[in-house]
Image (cartoon, rainbow, N blue to C red):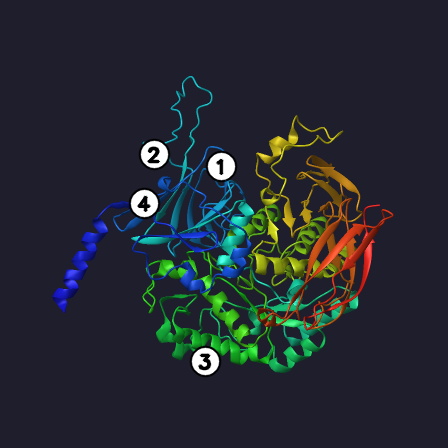
Amino acid sequence: MQSKSLFSFIFLLLFASITFSQQPQWTEVAPGVWKAVIGKPESYDLLKAAGTEPNKSALGKVGPASFPLNKPDIDATVTDGKTYLRFPLQKQEQIFGFGLNFQTVYQRGKILQLHVDHYGGKDNGRTHAPTPFYISSNGYGVFINSARYLTVYAGAGVRRDSKNPPVAKDRNTDKTWSARPYSDAVEILVPAGGVEVYVFGGPKAIDAIRRYNLFNGGGTLPPRWGLGFTQRVQRLYNADDVKNEAKAFEEKGYPLDFIGLEPGWQSKSYPCTFEWDKKRFPNPEQFVKDMMKVGIRINLWLNPYVSPEASIYNSIKPFTASHTVWVGAVPDFSMPEARKIFFGQLKKDQVDIGVSGYKIDEVDGYDHYLWPDVTTFPSGHGAEQMRQTYGLLVQRYSAEMYRALNTRTFGLVRASNGGGSSFPYVIYNDYYDHADFITALINSGFAGVLWTPEARASKTGEEWLRRFQTVVFSPMAMINAWASGTKPWSYPEVAEQVKQYSLLRMQMIPYWYSEFARYHFEGTPIFRAMNLEEGFSHEVKKEAVNQNLEQNPYAEAISKEIKDQYMAGENLLVAPLFTGQTSRKVVLPKGKWFDFYTGAYVGDGEIITVTPGLDKIPVYVKDGAIIPMMPPMLHAPAKGQVIDLEVRHYGQKPGSFKLYDDDGETFNYEKGEYSWRTITVERDAKGQWKGSISAPEKGKPNTVGQVSWNFMTK
């Protein structure tokens, strides 16, 4: 046996030292999705950790696609136990993605190490979701299915034998000399002897993103209550504190759907017991029931590191890592034994008594508190692989608890990665730059994740209102007051404006819910970059007048990063203002656009300068767009609750909108218990606007009551 093992070891050493290049062989594994296997891929990767299945039926509806690259230009080399990948770039091609970046949208020319980490203020690849997926402006995507730290040269290295090399220039005399010459390739180093690679066809960039999301099961469809407001209370609140806070929201007229309890709900945290503190919450089951009676669900903070004083510590210890986090044992969630013990405790103690979800903290980094790369895990997976997938694992198996009960959840997590599009979690962090939060929201659409620009506290009422306005137009409308204790009304000078925006969020739930359904069934990210919008790259039709703009402003603008405005669903363009700003420029795609609040025409394929005042965040609506809205309720509609609709129509063109409906809470939609109802607005024989909505399908959910029509553009 010893000689056989020695022979195998020597063989592996010899194999690792061999260098071989190969022309990848591409196989279409789903409509518009091709896969190539390079070398000998590792048995554990991102897609295996995520465990999601492609929605091939939905992929087939995206439309036809041909392989988008010249296959001979794609190169793969395996040497010294590492895999080198090379994908061609055209000269005018821009690339996007490579994870949840906070400061940049354009990634060409960057060098990145894709590494799960707490974001440290630089777009260097170390972030909460370093998804190894990039999208080209030429309309395709590339995904590297590896759970390793990948090094990416995104058009940042020049090969001697390049087919399209840059011109060598004399710095002494040539003012056009650049320290970063043009490169015609994306090159990726995978520290393993093989890897799976996927290419997603277009023909448009948004089509490639849709295919990527659908290949990973489709985007999440949260419960309706998840689209309402959440307040995370201070870390040591007790049951009475929580009840009083909920009562204050009700009395003051601010909407609230779920409250997040921070570490103090547990008997011990950092590391955690995952057991209720009986002094602060003497009767957890009754507390959860009491909150549900007033329309408030409970979400619980945790990090998954097990205290030696936890009741599950001794039983889970054999299935934990060699190193600890805050002296807490690190469960190996790739092992069913660890999952059964850990999630069994959560189910018994929390989920079974009605807790609606979790905030899963500190599964990202920093290196100084997370397990080091020398850690060993009992499954045999490397510490690096576990670092890259731990966020996926906790999302997957916590979500499975709720699926087993046929009830949806919506929570928060600090790390994700490729394959995680379908998980019902929103990423957040402790970084607090408002402008960078908006850039991250834009990039989340390229990364297959959701991100919230949460509000915590502010130095002034102006800052508070500006932050709150962007929270309203994001995946999760959250105040995170675990440290500050901030309430929506904490800044009296803007409390009324904050209330009006919180009620606007509730009014828009029919729109948001339908857009999340498109994310799930069609793969279209709700919050996304401007370059994905039809008409954004067209030439300006005319320049805005009297705006003191530079020559040909639109053409110049679209050649630069647009990282402070974004699309929110099919029809809305959101352009936030930040503290100290009284005006800003907004780049409008080609086509007529209208003011969300008034219906007034604002422009067509041009740059406008807007001065909205403190009370408004600029929001613009497409010509012919329909926005379904409901009354401004303090809680999201309950399961099956019938709600009246106000349908707003904007612009001068007829329009239609697919309104999604289901019971709002269960997974019965997977059994066909859902409906799409078409809302249509057109002119009658006299030229007057008229609206209609298709009849409800027999036997399908129908929560639509009376429908009224508001034709916003007069």
Residue under numbered circle 2: 159
User: How far apart are the two marked residues, 2 and 4, measured between alpha carbons?
Assistant: 18 Å
Identify residue type, mark 3. Ser
- Whichever of callouts 1 and 4 sits on the residue coming sooner in the sequence is 4
Residue under numbered circle 3: 311
Q: Nearer the viewer, residue 185 or 291?
A: 185
Label 2: state its secondary structure: loop
Q: Please, is residue 390 above or below residue 525 in the view? A: below
Residue contact between numbered discs 2 and 4, judged by CB atoms under 8 Å: no
- Whichever of callouts 2 and 1 sits on the residue coming sooner in the sequence is 1
For mark 4, does the 10 Å Cα neighbourhood hold few (<14), some (14 to 19), or many (20 or more) residues? Answer: some
Q: Position of residue 23 (x, y in %)?
A: 32, 45
- Whichever of callouts 3 and 4 sits on the residue coming sooner in the sequence is 4
Q: Residue 23, which numbered label?
A: 4
For mark 3, does the 10 Å Cα neighbourhood hold few (<14), some (14 to 19), or many (20 or more) residues? Answer: some
- Whichever of callouts 2 and 3 sits on the residue coming sooner in the sequence is 2
Q: Position of residue 497 (x, y in %)?
A: 77, 54
Residue under numbered circle 1: 93
* Quarter of the view holding residue 250: bottom right
Q: Nearer the viewer, residue 677 or 233?
A: 677
- Whichever of callouts 3 and 1 sits on the residue coming sooner in the sequence is 1
Q: Residue 461, which numbered label?
A: none
**Which residue appears at 78% of the width and 58% of the height?**
692
Q: In front of the other: label 1 or label 4?
A: 4
Label 3: state its secondary structure: loop
Identify residue type, mark 2. Arg
Identify residue type, mark 1. Glu
**Which residue appears at 48% of the width and 72% of the height?**
272
